[in-house]
Amino acid sequence: MKLVQLIEWLRARMRLVVKVCLVVLALLVILDALPAVVDKSHAHTEVEKWPGFWAVFGLVGCAFLIVASKAFGKLGIMREEDYYDE
């Protein structure tokens, strides 16, 4: 029951939740840019030394997987809802 109350409380304060998430994201990118926090001396390529590279890479990879799977599904895997009723 407390979980439902928490979700309702968060939904009522959606702008605050978004602002807090953006602040946390900005702090993580700043921490990633500090050489004392994250050792990037063993990076294989130059782009791996960019702050937040792997986060952006993961986001783009997930977006690609979603778009590709939807396109693949529409090619023939997905059926109409009344497919078995016919």
Image: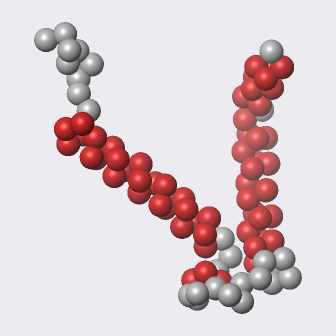
Badge count:
0
Instruction: Where is residue 47? Give x, y as percent.
Output: 57, 83
Residue at the left extreme?
86
- Determine whether 34 is above or below 8 in the image: below
Residue at the top extreme?
85
Residue name at image x 41 percent, y 53 percent: 65
Q: Which residue is at the front of the view, 40 or 18? A: 40
Residue name at image x 49 percent, y 55 percent: 62
Name the image quarter holding residue 80: top left
Camera sees residue 9: no
Instruction: Where is residue 85? Give x, y as percent.
Output: 19, 10
Quarter of the picture holding the N terminus: top right
Q: Is residue 58 left or right of residue 85?
A: right
Instruction: Where is residue 54? Give x, y as percent.
Output: 60, 69
- Determine whether 20 is above or below 49 in the image: above
Name the image quarter holding residue 46: bottom right
Quarter of the picture holding the C terminus: top left
- Determine whether 65 is above or below 73 in the image: below
Residue name at image x 27 percent, y 46 percent: 72
Residue name at image x 54 percent, y 67 percent: 57
Name the image quarter holding residue 49: bottom right
Instruction: Where is residue 34? Give x, y as percent.
Output: 81, 80
